[in-house]
């Protein structure tokens, strides 16, 4: 989450000043229009504010849409069920859970539309239960207050020193490419005879790619060029493909170095050239074609002898060609983003389906559990409010719904709900001091701004620090809401205390409920993600997802990023090699495609390998703690390699590459170092 508290820099103060200016502008306009709760306009600014202008505009649009949906639902449901409190409570609970479910289906910033709609209904409907005929006016006023805050935040962000998404995205991509180039240089340099470089933590580059999705989503609101977002998706897809290629290259080179002859001198020279070229990105356009041509020429001139060492050499050259083409595309796409001029005539060097696919992993079971949990606690809060007849109890229901929705997608929501409760409680204490001691000193709007400035400027600087951003946002919103600035100063200590206690009670209920019903933690989520990935691989090996290459590969990348994100707080040595399963998945797909173009004994051997891979991953899915290697699988792969080397043509070569990858990925080290062998048919059948 980041380090400790650091002193804010000038950029932090600038962002805080812009946000405060937008908040005061929104408050002034809401007061001028005599809206019933002008402080909601001020609070909304702190909800949507972001250092990047594109992110602010996207959040503003999503919040506006969510508010309108929630307000419309309140206008529809309250008159229908006003005389049936139990039914109204059930409707509110079901609406909250259903819209929460829609938000969890989409992990992009767009999910905020449904998240806000989920808890906007109770925010608007519950205060109107005593005056149901006024629900329309209340919904309109609440929408107007929020839309004013959204408009002010967007305008100030765009006009005053706007922070743009494209340069930030470009800087992150540059850092990622630099780490990827270092990985390649270490791998290729170690092949020339140096000690293997440590690559601990490099698979975590997948988690960094997953983080880029948020910036890419905001990019559409940052640039006037619509095609730039598509360019960013293409770049993200090729960055994703680099990971299994680098992982495969590392495994192949490591196996080749353990062979008696090591790495051939000509191949070592080509590897050094690729490594040097990747480090010198300024020469990329001129060098890429020459490097690929050299590698292809060397592969065609190589001996037809298909020993294990020869297979590894051929595999290394194939991976180097893929790496070079991918790197060439990444650099070209990165330049387009830097210039903000997508080239519609651009022709990719690497062509394969699925590089820009955005399929997501979804755990339907855990999602349904989270939805039911949020719905039930909201319903219980409503029933408790009705039964107690607590005048301000609606605030407890609202805070329960908000806390339950905000953190429902987390593996361990309780710690975050605790932060929510802490920030809310601190905000209420600050609001009480502001309302009864400081606000009475303001006799005009200018004085009010001066009195509010020290507190909100300080909170604004905290929101730019990742470790404290959520705390600062909750603190700002709750403080602005509970101060409750109106057109005239009206003191109601009893009402303030009652509403504050109701808010604390709602957040406390959400925390207790979460601790009781969501005790599972990260371990369960990890097990379910790994199991889902292995089941997909088993289905894929069985040919049940034929033609679904793009969606499956995108989902595998997504699972890899989710796994590594969850392992961020653990020892890197304890992290499973998710890239290995990814490579195995690609190999299975390639083997299926090659098998359709081969016949006879070779095709039968490949089918036996696919059946063995299916059994292997089915066993791992059902027995997660079982040994991850299978000697019988090694026998099947060796037999298929013997059959494939008897065939000629591109399909046979693709089959040999896929079988080599499977052997490196799934087989025990002893089987990897042994050469392919001819097996009697009876032994092959017994191995299966």
Image (tube, rainbow, N blue to C red):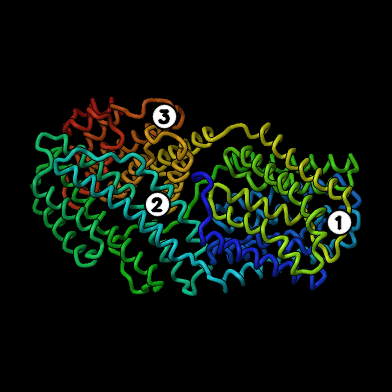
- Please determine whether, in this image, residue 203 is positioned above or below residue 50: above
Q: Residue at x 29, y 27 (%)?
A: 632
Residue denoted by label 3: 619
* Image location of residue 242, percent across then percent down: 32, 52
- Please determine whether, in this image, residue 594 is positioned above or below residue 365: below
Q: CA distance from mark 3 to mark 2?
A: 23 Å
Residue denoted by label 1: 128
On screen, residue 305 versus residue 288, left or right, reads left
Residue denoted by label 2: 549
**Label 1: few (<14), some or many (≥20) within 10 Å?**
many
Q: CA distance from mark 1 to mark 3?
A: 57 Å
**Where on the picture, by quarter, is residue 12?**
bottom right
Secondary structure at badge 3 equals helix
* Image location of residue 235, percent across then percent down: 38, 60
Q: Residue at x 78, y 64 (%)?
A: 38
Task: Report the quarter where the C terminus lies.
Answer: top left
């Amino acid at each position: 989450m980041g380090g400790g508290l650091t002193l804010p820099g000038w950029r932090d103060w600038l962002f805080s000043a812009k946000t405060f200016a937008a908040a005061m502008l929104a408050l002034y306009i809401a007061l001028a229009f005599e809206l019933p709760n002008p402080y909601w306009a001020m609070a909304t600014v702190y909800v949507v504010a972001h250092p990047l202008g594109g992110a602010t505009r996207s959040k503003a649009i999503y919040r506006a849409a969510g508010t309108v949906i929630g307000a419309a639902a309140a206008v529809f449901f309250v008159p229908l069920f006003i005389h049936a409190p139990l039914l109204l409570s059930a409707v509110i609970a079901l609406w909250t859970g259903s819209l929460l479910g829609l938000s969890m289906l989409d992990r992009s910033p767009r999910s905020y539309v449904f998240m806000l709609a989920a808890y906007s209904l109770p925010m608007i409907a519950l205060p109107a239960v005593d005056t149901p005929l006024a629900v329309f006016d209340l919904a309109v006023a609440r929408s107007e207050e929020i839309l004013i805050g959204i408009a002010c935040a967007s305008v100030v962000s765009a006009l005053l020193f706007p922070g743009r998404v494209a340069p930030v995205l470009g800087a992150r991509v540059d850092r990622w490419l630099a780490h990827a180039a270092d990985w390649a240089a270490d791998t290729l340099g170690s092949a020339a005879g140096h000690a293997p470089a440590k690559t601990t933590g490099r698979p975590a580059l997948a988690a960094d790619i997953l983080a880029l999705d948020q910036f890419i989503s905001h990019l559409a609101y940052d640039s006037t060029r619509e095609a730039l977002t598509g360019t960013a998706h293409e770049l993200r897809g090729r960055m994703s493909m680099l990971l299994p290629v680098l992982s495969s290259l590392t495994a192949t080179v490591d196996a080749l170095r353990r062979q008696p002859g090591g790495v051939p001198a000509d191949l070592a020279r080509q590897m050094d050239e690729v490594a040097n070229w990747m480090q010198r990105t300024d020469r990329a356009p001129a060098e890429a074609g020459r490097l690929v041509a050299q590698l292809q020429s060397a592969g065609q001139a190589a001996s037809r002898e298909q020993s294990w060492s020869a297979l590894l050499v051929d595999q290394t050259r194939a991976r180097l060609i893929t790496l070079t083409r991918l790197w060439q595309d990444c650099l070209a796409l990165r330049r387009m983003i830097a210039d903000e001029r997508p080239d519609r005539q651009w022709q990719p060097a690497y062509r394969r389906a699925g590089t820009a696919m955005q399929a997501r992993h979804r755990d339907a079971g855990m999602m349904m559990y989270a939805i039911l949990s949020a719905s039930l606690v909201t319903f219980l809060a409503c029933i408790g409010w009705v039964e107690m007849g607590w005048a301000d109890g609606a605030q407890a229901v609202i805070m329960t719904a908000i806390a339950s929705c905000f953190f429902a997608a987390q593996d361990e929501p309780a710690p975050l709900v605790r932060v929510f409760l802490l920030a809310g409680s601190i905000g209420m204490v600050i609001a009480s001091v502001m309302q009864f001691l400081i606000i009475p000193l303001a006799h005009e709007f200018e004085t009010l701004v001066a009195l509010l400035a020290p507190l909100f400027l300080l909170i604004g600087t905290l929101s730019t620090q990742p470790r404290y951003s959520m705390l600062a946002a909750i603190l700002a919103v709750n403080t602005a809401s509970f101060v409750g600035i109106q057109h005239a100063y009206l003191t109601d200590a009893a009402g303030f205390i009652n509403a504050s206690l109701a808010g604390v009670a709602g957040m406390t209920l959400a925390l207790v409920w979460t601790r009781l019903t969501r005790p599972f933690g990260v371990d369960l989520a990890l097990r379910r993600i790994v199991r889902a990935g292995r089941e997909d691989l088993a289905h894929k090996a069985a040919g049940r997802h034929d033609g679904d290459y793009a969606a499956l590969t995108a989902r595998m990348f997504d699972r890899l990023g989710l796994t590594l994100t969850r392992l961020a707080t653990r020892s890197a040595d304890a992290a499973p090699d998710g890239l290995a399963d990814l490579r195995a998945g690609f190999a299975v797909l390639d083997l299926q495609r090659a098998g359709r173009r081969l016949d006879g004994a070779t095709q039968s051997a490949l089918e036996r390998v696919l059946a063995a891979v299916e059994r292997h991953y089915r066993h791992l899915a059902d027995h997660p703690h079982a040994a991850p290697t299978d000697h019988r699988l090694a026998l099947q792969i060796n037999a298929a390699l013997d059959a494939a080397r008897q065939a000629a043509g591109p399909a046979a070569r693709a089959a040999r590459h896929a079988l080599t990858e499977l052997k490196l990925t799934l087989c025990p080290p002893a089987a990897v170092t042994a050469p392919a062998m001819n097996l009697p048919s009876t032994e092959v059948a017994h191995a299966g």
